[in-house]
Image (cartoon, rainbow, N blue to C red):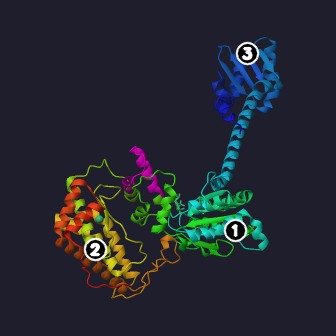
């Protein structure tokens, strides 16, 4: 529809409505009162009529008292009316008669309202039709629009920008080579995967690596999220999948990146309430399309998920996502490389040592590391520093870890005191437990949800942990709460996160790692069967009897209780250390490693409290 029409319509329309109303109900506004034919005849016979105008069956009269009346003649009356009632009187000059011919009347007053009505109705139709046509358009485009692949035109990511991931890059390099000169592979009869599935936690670089493949091969990078396919309306998702492939074929060679493939690719016939028809249709369409395009069309689909366990096995069959690459969290060396990549274009002060930062950022995902370098640069700009110093990096790291400082939140003194003893409790317990990482920073500046926190530097990346180490970890997690109870004789809600983590560790010690002597080395949960997360089973997925459940609970409880007692024991043996740390925290809010080490030296070397040292 032309853009001007609605505006024109906006004033044309009311006018038409008024005209139509007039033509329909015009009679109500006319000055003539309606009378019956009997009355009409009697008025004529009584000689009360001055003038008569007749038009077809309608007669309008002007009475002698000047009132206006009208009447409609019955059809059989129409032809004889003049002769029978008027002829004599008109000829005698008693009544003035105007007979309008039928056709005239039509022209003037019947046709015009009808015309107006016609035009009006036509116009209405026009609006309605064009509106619904528009709506139809919208409906069909609706399916298309959102499935529109996002083309990243500024994709400059190359393999050299991807730190670490050596093997992964090598595997992906084959795809690059294929996209660059498919002919080589076609001649060789080699089968190149149509689809690659990247599995890994959020922020581990699945998108980034895929972009690098496109960047390296110099082909377009299209991305779409699995959740874009999933809609309320049945059939929309499937048509989106179809459109996506049509579009991709037009732009081949190219990479299509489907993020969160689990949103569509979930196991069929699973989850609560049976299947989800729409999702299944979408998934089926995806499978059909993937089977349909020949392997050498130059389209490679890379999908990403962090829930590979819930994917429909059909997706992973040959000819579909038949290659899966696991992307893990970076280790210390990889973290250093990632930091190098992202500080390449930033000015670092000479005191910055990326290796040390890499050490202190255990558990950071690549995305968080990238975020850290960016935050540090922002801080440097805010403080108008020439370059990024290690202090700024530390501040940025804390910000990334715990959210920005809540400078405005006034913390009441009692709360500060609780937090100071709580954090000192963590540090002191950790200090006197073997196998725990050294304290890196303690602070009572509130950030995010935390009132304060204590961070440790892991000496090295450990991929396995011993039973003692896990127990000790629980002790130091509970050290915060223990200090509150010991010193202030009151406990706060601030420890809820510690308690949650301690409980998780204790449960996994018993159920997953077989660390409990009573239960033995048996796996008590397989974690796969959670139906709320799309698993296949309606059971809880844990395979053990009621008695075992009771035993597990009592084992977990006793681990936690023992650990808590141990934490209290350590703290009461080292109250002066706890006191000094807490007081210093109250004074200066943050204690960094060097300062902490000084204080800790005064009180002890790590003593070996744990009696049994059992390695796994
Ligand atoms: P995912 O898709 O796995 O959730 P992204 O690919 O979006 O994660 O990664 C987020 C950011 O992390 C990227 O923009 C990039 O800056 C950084 N990043 C991820 N992996 C690497 C890597 N191997 N080297 C350097 N930077 C990386
Ligand atoms: Zn705590």
Q: Label 2 neighbourhood size at 10 Å, few (<14), some (14-19), many (20+)? A: many
The circle drawn on residue 475 is 2
Look at the image and tell me whether residue 316 can be seen: yes
Does the segment drawn in magenta span residue 598? no
Mark 2 lies on a secondary structure that is helix
What residue range appears in magenta?
370-395
Q: Position of residue 579 (x, y in %)?
A: 18, 63
Q: Nearer the viewer, mark 1 or mark 3?
A: 1
Q: Is residue 224 left or right of residue 332?
A: right
Choose the circle earlier in sequence order: 3 or 2. 3
Disc 3 target residue? 51
Disc 1 target residue? 290
- Distance of label 1 from label 3 (alpha carbons): 88 Å
Q: Nearer the viewer, mark 2 or mark 1?
A: 2
Does the segment drawn in magenta span residue 376? yes
For the residue pair 365 and 134, the one nearer the viewer reads as 365
Q: Tell me: residue 483, above or below residue 106.
A: below
Q: Tell me: residue 480, above or below residue 94.
A: below
Tell me the quadrant of the picture where the C terminus can be found. Answer: bottom left
Tell me the quadrant of the picture where the N terminus can be found. Answer: top right
Q: Position of residue 124 (x, y in %)?
A: 69, 38
- Distance of label 2 from label 1 (alpha carbons): 52 Å
Q: Tell me: residue 356, above or below residue 512.
A: above
* Residue name at image x 51 percent, y 55 percent: 344
Q: Is residue 107 left or right of residue 528?
A: right
């Amino acid at each position: 529809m032309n853009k001007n029409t609605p505006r024109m319509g906006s004033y044309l329309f009311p006018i038409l409505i008024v005209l139509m109303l007039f033509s329909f109900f015009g009679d109500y506004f006319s000055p003539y009162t309606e009378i019956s034919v009997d009355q009409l005849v009697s008025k004529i016979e009584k000689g009360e009529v001055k003038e008569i105008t007749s038009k077809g069956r309608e007669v309008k009269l002007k009475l002698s008292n000047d009132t206006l009346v009208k009447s409609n003649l019955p059809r059989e009356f129409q032809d004889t009316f003049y002769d029978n009632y008027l002829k004599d009187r008109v000829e005698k000059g008693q009544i003035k008669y105007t007979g309008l011919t039928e056709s005239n009347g039509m022209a003037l007053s019947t046709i015009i309202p009808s015309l107006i009505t016609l035009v009006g109705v036509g116009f209405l139709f026009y609006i309605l039709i064009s509106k619904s046509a528009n709506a139809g358009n919208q409906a069909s485009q609706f399916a298309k629009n959102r499935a529109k692949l996002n083309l990243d035109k500024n994709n400059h990511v190359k393999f050299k920008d991807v730190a670490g991931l050596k093997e992964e890059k090598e595997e992906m390099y084959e795809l690059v080579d294929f996209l660059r000169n498919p002919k080589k592979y076609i001649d060789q009869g080699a089968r190149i995967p149509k689809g690659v599935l990247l599995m890994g936690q959020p922020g581990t670089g699945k998108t980034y690596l895929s972009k690098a493949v496109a960047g390296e091969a110099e082909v377009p990078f299209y991305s779409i999220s699995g959740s874009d396919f999933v809609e309320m309306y049945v059939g929309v998702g499937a048509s989106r999948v179809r459109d996506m492939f049509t579009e991709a074929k037009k732009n081949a060679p190219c990479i299509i990146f489907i993020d969160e493939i689990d949103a569509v690719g979930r196991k069929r016939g699973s989850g609560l309430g049976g299947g989800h028809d729409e999702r299944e249709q979408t998934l089926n369409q995806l499978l059909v399309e993937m089977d349909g395009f020949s392997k050498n069309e130059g389209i490679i689909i890379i999908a990403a998920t962090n829930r590979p366990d819930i994917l429909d096995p059909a997706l992973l069959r040959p000819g579909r996502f038949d290659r899966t690459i696991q992307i893990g969290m970076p280790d210390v060396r990889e973290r250093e490389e990632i930091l190098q990549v992202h500080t390449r274009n930033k000015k670092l002060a000479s005191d910055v040592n990326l290796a040390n930062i890499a050490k202190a950022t255990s558990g950071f995902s690549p995305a968080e590391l990238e975020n850290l370098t960016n935050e540090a640069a922002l801080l440097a700009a805010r403080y108008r520093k020439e370059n990024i110093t290690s202090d700024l990096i530390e501040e940025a790291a804390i910000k990334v870890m715990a959210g920005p400082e809540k400078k405005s939140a006034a913390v009441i003194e009692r709360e500060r005191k609780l937090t100071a003893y709580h954090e000192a409790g963590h540090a002191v317990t950790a200090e006197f437990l073997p196998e725990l990482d050294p304290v890196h920073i303690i602070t009572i500046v509130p950030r995010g949800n935390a009132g304060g926190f204590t961070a440790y530097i892991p000496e090295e990346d450990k991929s396995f942990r011993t039973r003692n180490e896990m127990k000790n970890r629980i002790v130091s997690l509970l050290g915060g709460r223990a200090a509150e109870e010991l010193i202030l004789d009151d406990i706060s809600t601030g420890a809820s996160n510690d308690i949650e983590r301690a409980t998780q560790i204790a449960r996994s010690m018993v159920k997953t790692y077989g660390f409990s002597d009573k239960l033995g080395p048996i796996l008590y949960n397989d974690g796969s069967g959670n139906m709320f997360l799309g698993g296949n089973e309606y059971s809880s997925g844990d395979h053990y009897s009621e008695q075992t459940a009771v035993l597990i609970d009592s084992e977990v409880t006793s681990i936690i209780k023992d650990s808590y007692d141990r934490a209290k024991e350590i703290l009461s043996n080292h109250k002066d250390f706890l006191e000094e740390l807490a007081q210093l925290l109250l004074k200066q809010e943050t204690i960094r490693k060097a300062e902490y080490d000084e204080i800790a030296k005064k009180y002890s070397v790590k003593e070996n409290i744990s009696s049994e040292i059992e390695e796994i």
